[in-house]
Amino acid sequence: MLVWTERNRGNGERVVCYQRVTPPPGGSFEVPSDPTQPCPTQISQPTDAEGRRLTASQPFIFVGANAVNVAYSVARSVQESGHGLADIYLAASIDGGASWPQPPVRVATSLVETACEAEPPGPTPCTSCTRTGLGPCDQPGERELQQVYLSPASVLEVNQNPQAWRRWVFGMRLPSDVLGFRQEQGTGSWTEVKILDECNGIPPVCEKTLESLEEPKAECLGPWFFAQRPDATARGTRVHLAWQAEGTDRRWDVFEAEHTVFGTPTQWACANVSSLTDGLTGHLPAVSLDGNPQVLNRLWADNNAGIWKVRAKKDLGSDVSISGANAFLPDIVRATKATPPQNTNVYAVYSRVVNPLDPVDPLAARNYDIYWNKSQDGALWELEEPLEPPYPTSTAPSLFPSITYDAQGDGLWIVWREGDGPNWAIKGQKILTP
Ligand SMILES: [Ca+2]
Ligand SMILES: [Ca+2]
């Protein structure tokens, strides 16, 4: 199953697209860069309940036994007022992604003018700043309450005894909240959990502006601030979330939070994954919670020794580089093959710059290729391998790789974005048939 963001050439808005691919026997497929239809299946909706145009991005897909969740970020079109705000939506399928009968639901809401807050610093204390109903915030000392939700992720938590489940959608509320929204089985409502408040206390006060992303203030450092690029994984009632935020060394660093007991959904344990004091950047985390017994594997990209590499850390072990130089954008999967012989390897995929001589912005349009690596235990890794031809010789940037097993559990697939210029294709290639 694929999700991606596509720009509608008619009106310029972005939409979240979905396609269920039946892997062809040839071992590769392509979603071309210029499809006749903008989307095989459009997940996101073009307008909100009030008829305003929307633009959608940042899709995250979770695939369970029959449950498929697609969480994504939605902002108002720049053609509409209030386009600096953003919400989180969730589309859910219960038949393995074959149909999406219900419209997506808004999990985290900022796009309603129903509340006002005190204008800081506020010449007079605000005693009644919350309103119900639409209307401008026209009282002295008031301004419209603005909340921006970004970077969604989603999983399903399943309890065996008694049998029960809940949906989780994770999201970041600028500048300082790492949130979980939970929906219990049989209910339609969503309850917010402030994950970091459960384990690190209340964040320091920090001016909440998008501009702070450029130049964070001294008090805007730590696991709360400007959190983004999450990945989430779940097995049973063990739910694991990782993200990047401003470390105390004023670099991106990787943080994580884990919840394990179904009956206490507000209880999370938090930790940092990359070093907060080494002066180095650690970012772009990917996590997998699989195997029997369960193993937690993490990947991220960091510039240890001045060279960008992908690092791996298993459970409580130490971290290790697993890639060649100039590697970014990792993804990870542990084999979940259903039929014997059981394959318990863990696989990593990432993009690497092919010709790194020009030390420019690493995410600029240069030639990246896709590499992958595997480990039997998640601690010791083998030598990386490029994709089979023709992709090692493609001169276009090959970026944003994902890795997964197919539904039969016997084929390992890498899917990535391929192409120069404004139009990109999505490519898929099988690398392994155990
Ligand atoms: Ca660091
Ligand atoms: Ca390439």
Image (cartoon, rainbow, N blue to C red):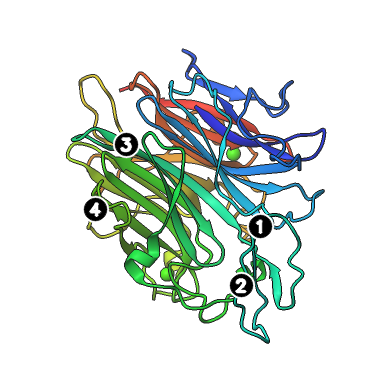
Q: Tell me, for residue 114, which label it has, or none.
A: 1
CB under 8 Å between discs 1 and 2? no
Residue behind mark 3: 165
User: Who's the residue at 41% across and 73% down the image?
Assistant: 202
Amino acid type, mark 4: Asp
Q: Residue furthest bottom?
A: 123
| Callout 2 secondary element | loop
CB under 8 Å between discs 4 and 1? no
Q: Tell me, for residue 315, which label it has, or none.
A: 4
Residue 35's spot in the image, x, y percent?
71, 23
**The image quadrant in which ligand 1 is located:** bottom left
Amino acid type, mark 1: Thr
Q: For the residues marked 4 and 1, what is the alpha-carbon distance in whole angstroms?
A: 45 Å
- Closer to the chain start, of discs 3 and 4, is 3
Which is nearer the eye, 106 or 141? 141
| Residue 309 visible to the viewer | no
Q: Which residue lies furthest to the top in this view?
A: 25
Q: In this view, does 228 lie to the left or right of 13?
A: left
| Callout 3 secondary element | strand
Residue behind mark 2: 128
Mark 4 beta carbon near ligand 1 (under 8 Å): no
Q: For the residues marked 3 and 4, what is the alpha-carbon distance in whole angstroms?
A: 25 Å
Q: Nearer the viewer, mark 4 or mark 2?
A: 2
Q: Quadrant of residue 49?
A: top right
- Closer to the chain start, of discs 4 and 2, is 2
Mark 3 beta carbon near ligand 1 (under 8 Å): no
Which is nearer the eye, 58 or 114? 114
